[in-house]
Amino acid sequence: MDQAVIAEKIQAGQARTVQDYIDETPFWADGTDVPDGPISGMQWRIWWLSIAGKFFEGLVVFMTGVALPLLAKEFSLTAAQHGMVGAATLFGILIGASALGAMADYFGRKPMFIFEIGLFTLFLVLIVLSPGFTWFIVCLFGLGLALGCDYPTAHVMISESTPSRVRGRLVLGAFGFQAAGALAGTAVGYFALSLDPDLGAWRWMYGAAILPALLVLIGRFSVTESPHWLAETGQRQRAEHELKRLLERHPPYPPAFTLPPAKTESEAKKGSGYGVLFKKRTRRALVLASVPWFLQDLGTYGIGIFTPTILAASLGHKREHAQSVADLVNNDLLAAKGAAMIDVLLLLGIAAAILLSDKVGRIRLQVVGFIGCAVGLFIAAQSAGFDGPMKLVLIFAGFMLFNFMTNLGPNAQTYLIAGEVFPTKVRAKGAGFAASFAKIGACTTAFLFPILLADIGTQALLYGLVATSLLGAAMTWMFRIETKGVKLDTVGVELE
């Protein structure tokens, strides 16, 4: 079809954007609109294969908390090395999110979608075979690289293939599997310890994820490339072909696809570099996507990774000094059980976020969530002044409230917002930069948490996280950009 015919179709309203076609709903024979069209099989396939990255992140990061006492004994870790174990994966995520995730803007969403899960699978195999501490840290870093790449890539794979009206629900639904992974991580750790009460049980923990990762790798070869990205890079015909595959339904609709004329090579490259993120119109989005996420990760990863350690130190339900491997395993089992109880609230929090994000809006939930996190941490901090049952009640109530509110608000909404507020050309770069900036906070917390826990105590540490949570609420409100129900095409135009 030549450009003149396409131009006529655009003027006649017959040529529409990629998002117009994705958002289109069918209608009854009498002309009555159907409010919600069915999600296609390909859209569901992309969603299911995208949840894996978040699940594996929760699995690996939180399982490391259970494995840490065993690793400490086997490798004779110092306090600094404890911090390195907690920070290695997060540092990998920091590098991978921007260095690898940004490649999705250059090479396409699908190639990086496949590459990152392949990299993850490779390092899972290598970590099980780790001969010593140094190699173990290298493998944790490699896992982080893959998971970091997944942050922007999986998000844009979902958001650029789903209708605007349910985008928040589907993105957060996938993100919720981070909480499922966290719960699974503590469960896998518990059962591995139960079945093999030995120092080497941590190898079984990581090995349990190899087969699921292989299956996800195979499945990702079958998905479509993002029509949004293809259209933005001047590949109109391929974009129309992939859009047809994406929206294949029975009965079929729309019956045909006609996108606007392809951009020239110079137009496609214009405004696609990292520099556009720091321009005046995009700077507000960059601050909103990055700073609150950084502040949120200070608390979420510190509390999440070291919940078993905090519980073991606070509750006193263990022998203070393990005399044998059996003592060590028993202590670890007790802490893992308590951590699993608290982690259930992560699932309830993300469930609430899924239900409310497309109704209440991202900004309100993030502000309320930050304030709720502060309240939960403040309650937990008060446990320092009590003994016995009241100490137990305050610790569990505070951490449970924190976990619920963080997944209702900042932990979920920062991820969602980062993938929505940037133009298509730099969406992966923007989301990747925000994730990397956030992981600076996560790495800092993971490395310093065990040191500060020993030096200043649990209460002072929790008070510090109360302050960062309140600051997160303030920064969110100051730089707010609401993306509830907004078309990605529209957001891109407004910010370019």
Image (cartoon, rainbow, N blue to C red):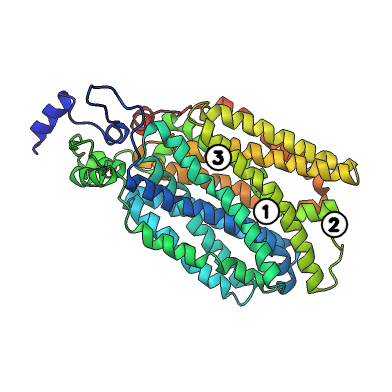
Q: Residues within 10 Å of mark 3 (few under 14, many from 20)?
A: many
Give the quadrant of the C terminus: top left
Asked whether the beta carbons under mark 3 and mark 2 sit within 8 Å of each other, the answer is no
Q: Residue at x 14, y 28 (%)?
A: 9
Q: Secondary structure at mark 1?
A: helix
In terms of depth relative to the viewer, which is nearer, 166 or 97?
A: 166
Q: Position of residue 101 (x, y in %)?
A: 43, 51
Foreground: 10 or 472? 10
Q: Viewer-proximal residue, 29 or 326? A: 29
What amino acid is at disc 2? His
Point out residue 350 in the picture as x, y percentages from the top left corner.
57, 40
Q: Position of residue 283 (x, y in %)?
A: 47, 32
Residue that badge 1 annotates: 305
Which mark, by number, is residue 317?
A: 2
Q: Which quadrant is home to the N terminus?
A: top left
Q: Residue at x 82, y 54 (%)?
A: 313
Q: Which residue is mark 3?
A: 412
Separation of marks 3 and 2 at Cα, in angstroms: 33 Å
Upstream in sequence: badge 3 or badge 2? 2
